[in-house]
Image (tube, rainbow, N blue to C red):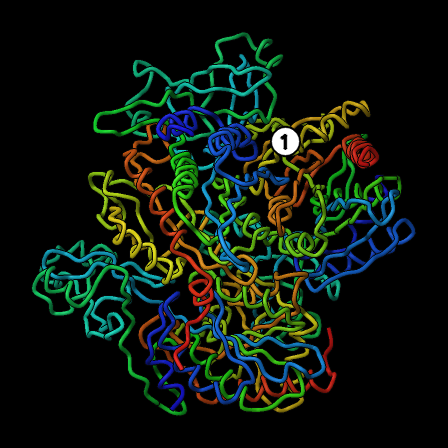
Amino acid sequence: MLLKRLTEASGPSGFEDEVRQIIYDEVRGVADRVYTDALGTLIAETNMGAREPKVLLTAHMDEVSLMIVAIEEQGLLRFRPNGGVDPRILVAKPVRVGAERLVGVIGSRAVHLQKPEEREQPHSLEQLFIDIGASSRMEAEKYVQPGDFAVFATEYEEIGERRAKAKSFDDRVGCAVLIETMKKRFELPVIYAFTVQEETGLRGAGPVAYRTEPDIAIAIEGTVCFDVVETPSHGQSTIQGGGPAVSVVDARTIAHTAFREHIVRVGEEQGIPVQLRRTVGGANDVGAIHLTGSGIVSAAISVPTRYIHAPAQIISLDDYENTIRLLEAVLRSIEQGGFSV
Amino acid sequence: MKELIRQLTIPSGPSGYEAPVKEVIHTLVQPYVDEVYDDALGNLYAVKRGASGPAAKTILLAAHMDEPALSVIDIDDQGFLRVAPLGPLRASTLGGARVIFARTGRRGIVGAEHGVAQKDLDFSHLFVDIGAISLDDAREHVRIGDAATFAYGFDEVGADLIVGHALDNRVGCAVLVEALKRTHSGYTIAAVFSAQQEVGSRGARVAGQRIHPDAALVLDVSPVGDTPKSERLALTLGGGPGIKALDATMVVAPKVRDMIVDAARLADVPYQIEVSPRTASDAGALFLSREGIPTGGIVVPARYVGTPSQMVHLRDVEQTVTLLTAYLGQLQ
Amino acid sequence: MFNAKELLIGLTEATGSPGDESTPAALLREAVNGLADTIETDSIGNTFLYCAGEGNTPRPRVMITAHTDEISLMVARIDKGGFLRVAEVGGFDPRTLLGQEVIVHAKRKLLGVVGSKPPHLTSLAERNKSVPLQELFIDLAMPEESVRELVNIGDFITISRRTMELSGGRLAGKAMDNRAGVTTLALCLSELRKLRFAADVYAVGTVQEEIGCKGAQTAAFRLLPDLAVAIDVCHGETPGVASDLVQKLGGGPVVSFGPRIHPKLFKRLTDVARDANIPVQIEVTQGPTWTDADPIQIVQAGIPTALISIPLRYMHTSVETLAFEDVRHAGLLLARFIASLDMAYVEGLTCYLKD
């Protein structure tokens, strides 16, 4: 099960090795050429001799994580977040530490040991630590050193009706969409890039766009979805089960109007549900890609993901499958000259 | 000049949706340049070849076309629109503002939810009323992703002062249009009417990479320090064009600044030096292009920048054109 | 041949504001005269010192950078009485500026003082508030007329400070950030002359780091090296600061680890240090390094990048303090690292896959 393997792998920003290897093993027999760049982005080229436009598809491999920065006398690990983590969600969560996937738990002072006024405040990072069961610094140092990373220890499971929960659907769901899409053949030069360091400032995508010089780029994301109790329509961003979401404006991009309208039209024509992402916060790799070179016509298509950046994220499997269908339909339309730059 | 500025401030130019402004400028500059084209970001390029032939060096002149706007993110059952800012707008200043949607020309009023203190207002408390009676009615006129700008237009105050919601930076665009008309330079002039400056100079960044000029100059407006208890800035309205030394994006190298100062002295144009630490411009993005581009700027002093009523002095605008033309004329 | 400590003292006492780094750049060029094969300056002021490697081409192309600029102020306005109001060019803590002597780079260099209200005239409430930059003023001790005659809006202002030798081989002064790095570049080139090395080395004195690491980005675009090492300063141990955020003065140069650093370069630097018996410390940084390394890593199609830092106390003040031994060791480490490079190693830097 691709989503399970991808989401349970560890991929801290800058240290995406586990995820990269899984994807490499998956795509090496499919793409014409597979290689990595200086930052570790995995690039898979298909049908490069075909008639242009050249299309770049991206999904990022990295996830938000915790970097171990110091080991306390008692063997407890101090950490700092690598990527945007709300410290309030960390307390009492299990994590996996380092390449050996050591089990650890995020602890804090028990509620009984806190003053009433302290209980009103969320735990700050300084009050949290990871406990791997070591009884001293010396013992902990046998297993862990500063610079190692911890990721959430969530298991992938299908729950409810046509939904799945896991960590890091942002953006392993995008990686899965790209892998599934690659298995189809297009009469277009299509480059699939599994990028690094998106969560720490969209750092991997710009170099890939610079290297590959695409005419058109599409990023596939897991994006904010908060269609939950008491949230007004304008605070939801996307609706789970409402289909892939096309970005309009976010913190780093104003979408190319003609291309985003084209994508929505393709969805309507093919009977694939499509929604617009209705918020301006957040960003994705398009923010770096569209400003590369002389400017690149780009779009972002996202799978709505509840509880993004938290340990247990939820997606709709229908949205996931519809994103694969929509991406194929868009590529077919480009293949047939339905959109040109 | 006044008429040109008026003409340029009529179309609405939200960041990312500058097409209406671009069309007007395209028509205006066409007769004076060798080539006009645009790009994926929405920039308009107008190139005038240098007198010294194909070997001529290139200077990039940038004036941004866009203005801050409200982007529609949701429409409710009664037809009220929810919006988010494109560019530096503050929610607390927008209650009662009149706006116009660039795509359809539909007008609207910004309203605020009751019970939130003025200073605590954020965009989630604001909505736009376009006079629709239902969701379906609203959809006839506005779609998610449409953008609205202020709808206050152009005014005159006294003999020489003009006021408008988009003088930042249609004044810079007007200066650039006029300079293309009048200038004869040894350099090739790549005029860039840039898109998306208000959201972080995205257009300028791409333009710098594409043109790869030998030097760059931005044309913009900059706030003055001559009103009661104003920010401690040195520019004054009517004091002549400002030559950029520092803004929030850029420190101009003294030798670049001095070349413009020398041009002002030679042309006998009064000038001021701009040190404006909280003002953004396209200069920083252009400077960082590729191997690095020596970049400077000339600004028109303006009052009330960041409000819907920016004010400039027509003589400053005229003198900015004179200075720019003189500077370009001396480039060999 | 230069004396490294004298070079560092000379560099720190020289002034070089972002946008006008010509003076420290000239001192660097002078120091390495005879050590570099060619020396160039680009259109925005970056200084390129080139040393050719030995052997057949292609040779590894290595960029090492240190920024030449220092945080400065700029005259924003001349107020009544001839008092100057300022804008910052780089990040000052305005609290460290009260009572500071400064140099205004006007038609001639003018010594001035950042004025402060005497305690006799301040209320308790006032004393409990720090003075923001906008409220600071510089007193040039001359009539307004003379000030207006000599000073222009846009003139740079720098800290006035003679560099001091403290006990135990430590130095204190302004602009150790990053003239310590500039000195490291010179030391590295001098050490390389004693070694055999295959790499083509480009030592770059970069501009405008303090306002956004600008020169390093454009220099990297120009050179497109196979790998890059940025040299800068990091925080020295200070009471009350978490141990992972600070490093020991005198404990050796600091090698960074984290997402912005290529893992193989980190490993090679620490291996070289161990083999050559050079003391080093390790810093783990999960976020931005806030140095030239950040932009260099993502220039063009991406450049493998590393960071070596000199521990420094009281950063961005006029009494930045470091252990000179750390600078010397950084120069040694950098030279030995360069001497260890060959093409096979460089080609391996883009290989992340296991078949």
What residue appears at the point 31 percent right and 21 percent down from the top-left corner?
Answer: C123
Instruction: State the residue at coordinates (74%, 25%).
Output: B262
| Residue C95 appears in the figure | no
Residue A32: percent from left, percent from top:
56, 85
Q: Nearer the viewer, residue C245 or C343?
A: C343
The x, y position of residue B286, in whole percent, is 64, 48
Q: Chain of mark 1?
A: B
Asked if B199 appears above or below B145 in the picture, the reply is above
- Work out whether residue B169 or residue B244 is closer to the camera in this orientation and state it: B244
Residue displayed at 23% across by 75% down: A100
Left or right for A202, reference B66: left
Please give left or right for residue C355 compared with residue B234 in the image.
left
Q: Quadrant of the C terminus of chain A?
A: bottom right
The image quarter in which residue A196 lies: bottom left
Residue, far left: A135
Relative to residue A10, is residue C6 depicted above or below? Answer: above
Amino acid type for the residue under numbered disc 1: Glu
Residue at 49% across / 13% down in the picture?
Answer: C140
Give the position of the N terminus of chain A as an image quadrant: bottom left
The correct choice, above or below, for C230 with respect to A329 in the image is: above
Query: Is A128 placed above or below C44 here?
Result: below
Measuring from the top left, give residue C156's x and y in whole percent. 54, 26
Q: Is residue A95 left or right of residue B278?
A: left
Residue A109, by quadrant, is bottom left
x%, y% of residue B238?
Answer: 73, 27
The residue where tag 1 is placed is B274
Q: Secondary structure at mark 1?
A: strand
Viewed as shown, does residue C264 lie left or right of A298?
Answer: left
What is the crowding at mark 1: few (fewer than 14 residues within 10 Å), some, or many (at least 20)? many
Most extreme residue toward the front is C55
